[in-house]
Amino acid sequence: MTIYNHSKEKLFQRIDTYVEDMIDLQIGLTAIPALSPENQGNGEAEKANFLRSFLEEHNFPNLIFLHAPDERVPVGYRPNILIHHSGRDKSRTLWILTHTDIVPPGELHLWHRNPYEGYVKDGRVFGRGTEDNQQDLVASIFALKAFIDEDILPEISVGLAFVADEETSSRMGVDYILNHKDNPFRKEDLIVVPDFGTPDGSSIEIAEKSMLWLKFTITGLQCHGSRPSLGRNAFLAASHLIMELQRLHRFFPQRDRLFFPPESTFQPTKKEGNSSSINTIPGEDTFYMDCRVLPRYDIEDVMKEIQRRMDVVERLYGVKAKVSPVQEVQAPSPTPQNAPVVSALKKAIHDVYQVKGKTIGVGAGTVAAVFRKYGYNVAAWSKLDHQAHQPNESCLIENMVGNAKVFAHMMLQKRTSRC
């Protein structure tokens, strides 16, 4: 890939002049809560309307609206706004996808100010949503705005997507768009999702582990603590099962250095209360597990091995064991490490932040997995400070500006025969 240095310098200088405008947009977006119905909110429509007005006022071209019907919110839909700006190479589009919804602020007494009152302090913009995901939403807008204001044609067509419902399921956002008859995404496109990042900006997420959250219920027979032979101790059986499940590592032992930790993990987490008194042997016990499984394994095979161990415990203790998936997500195939979007990101990261980009896998789920499920190559990347979902959430202004330059750099890269 090649890049025109003169145009790059003009674009970067233009982005530097946008700092106050970027902060103003951040504060304007922060003032409008955008909570899903699952989080007792009215959706993202008001925030999306504010964003639409900004985009139209600043002459952004070719706005596309693919709103997902949702009767749970007052307006009856969840808004998805997209922009498509043609470049020299119209055969591919560089997409940068961010989301407009946020999570609730949590315990208000932990906030120094109103979570929806954005403010600047110590080189940061504070407020709910400022890092997750407004930092890169704003950065993507001003990256493209620099091309428009400088009258420079991007080397690749550019798409910006501002979607709903990322914080809960993506059913009304990315998933809805990818199944829409007017879906604008193509398999040859370069897709960046700033839904993951590290403080130095070096890590590019290309793979995720499968996610299996399980609820186990053991049913025995309650009795007096002094006469255990008259009952069947559900707590004892559950404890034995937990130790059996720890041996799952032996059956799924592979390691992948793309991930940290590099192995699949099977961890007991939450436990519900059983007997309310010390001298009563419980007849029912419930616990949960969080399993993160390397994508090379089929989670159906994991479930079969879990069931085998439950059968053993049932026979040993005379109890009934039941498992119910709370969340079950089979990881899609990873994005290839040499995919064009990865190569373009590495070059931009190196030029802007002077760090060497590296591909990694993560244990948590990101919206990138939705794209991969449908066969799209996508990279999740951002330079961020890990403030998401915390009280007094903030974003570093220098990250917002720097990431805009990374996005602009990618828009300016020209494909050559060597790529």
Image (cartoon, rainbow, N blue to C red):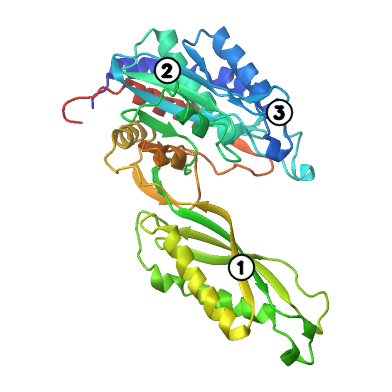
- Quarter of the image where one finds residue 185: top left
Residue pictured at 40% horizontal, 71% vertical: 251
Which residue of the protein is positioned furthest toward the left in this rendering?
A: 417
Instruction: State the residue in front, 173 or 109.
Output: 173
Q: Name the residue under label 1.
A: 322
Question: Reading the chain from its start, which is encountered first: label 2 or label 1?
Answer: 2
For badge 3, the amino acid type reads Val
Looking at the rendered image, the quarter that the N terminus falls into is top left
For badge 2, the amino acid type reads Gln
Q: Position of residue 2 (x, y in %)?
A: 23, 24
> In terms of secondary structure, where does tag 3 sit?
loop
Q: Report if the CB atoms under discs 1 and 3 are less than 8 Å apart.
A: no
Q: Mark 3 points at which residue?
A: 73
The answer for how far apart the CA atoms under marks 2 and 1 are is 61 Å
Circle number at residue 134: none
For badge 1, the amino acid type reads Lys
